[in-house]
Amino acid sequence: MEPLDFLNSLKPEASLTLSPAILWSVFMFMFIVFAVFSSIIFYHWLKYDWSDKNIKKASLIYISAAVLIFVSEIILISLIF
Amino acid sequence: MINLHTDEKKITEVRRHLFVFYARMLWPVILLLVPLLLFSVFRGLAESILGANDGLIFLFFYLFWILILWMTFFYQWTDYYFDVWIITNERIIDIEQKGFFHRQISTLRVARIQDITVNVEGVLATLVKFGDIHVHSASHDDHDSHSESFIIKQAKNPFEVKEKLLEIARKRENSQDMGL
């Protein structure tokens, strides 16, 4: 018996059902949070010096990874349901 | 961005050492691993609550957790990158960024530099080459500066920066002596 196997015996009576609406609500909430945060950070980057190559590089990395996460989330929702 | 005077040339920018920034980023890395650890420990429990798709549902929430940490990382990077000393042939411009909505800019004319002290403390600072640079100005009532001492903390290659500043101050002094 594995040392932490006892945790698997702590099974609840009722299981939680997640509807697509709940996941889409979480998705939309996170998207709004991301949009607000991004608008603030981009405002600072543009105001500081948009010609700065490090800022350009940072913004590209920031947006690319975020797009990747949001696309993965959409794929995940379609896989779950 | 800072507007420079006519004939004023930017010589260099000084920031905290990147090592300091990465050290500050250690806790988000730890926070990145915590859900993975918890999920592997409580896998059986998660399966009984969430059903057969527990792995995918976990991944759904975990990706958002990564997004939050991703935003935190760039918030910290912006704070690090905007906290800068701009050294020109005329002055030192100290821009201190405290979060998104607090920015303090102060300047010190190179001609006012009286003394520069470098403080490298500890094994890590010595090995990685970062330290505090204190620039003391000649006058208390300098309208350009708020205090008689300028400090940049954990600057990269502090001794090189000191030499550069002294050289600029020397050149400035020489050109003033020659009436330029």
Image: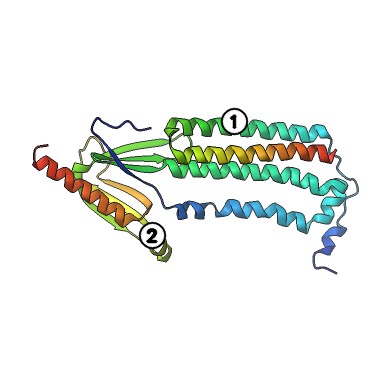
Whether discs 2 and 1 lie on one chain: the answer is no
Which element type, helix, strand or loop, lies under badge 2?
loop
**Quarter the C terminus of chain B occupies:** top left
Report the residue at 59% width, 51% height from top: B28
Report the Cα–Cα distance between label 2 and label 1: 38 Å
The subunit letter for the residue under badge 1 reads A
Q: Residues within 10 Å of mark 1 (few under 14, many from 20)?
A: few
Residue A64 in which image quadrant: top right
Which element type, helix, strand or loop, lies under badge 1?
helix
- Disc 2 residue type? Lys
Rendered image coloring scheme:
rainbow
Q: Which mark is residue A58?
A: none
Image location of residue A15, percent across then percent down: 88, 45
Q: For this rendering, which residue is in front, A42 or B34?
A: A42
Give the farthest residue toward the left: B178
Residue B43 in which image quadrant: bottom right
Residue A34 in which image quadrant: top right
The reply, left or right, for residue B38 in relation to residue A79 is left
The reply, left or right, for residue B89 in relation to residue A29 is left
Q: Which mark is residue B129?
A: 2
Report the residue at 77% width, 59% height from top: B41
Report the residue at 65% width, 45% height from top: B66
In the picture of the structure, the residue carrying the numbered disc 1 is A36
Image location of residue A74, percent across then percent down: 75, 36
Image location of residue B176, percent across then percent down: 12, 40
- Disc 1 residue type? Val
Report the residue at 17% width, 43% height from top: B172
**Quarter the N terminus of chain B occupies:** top left
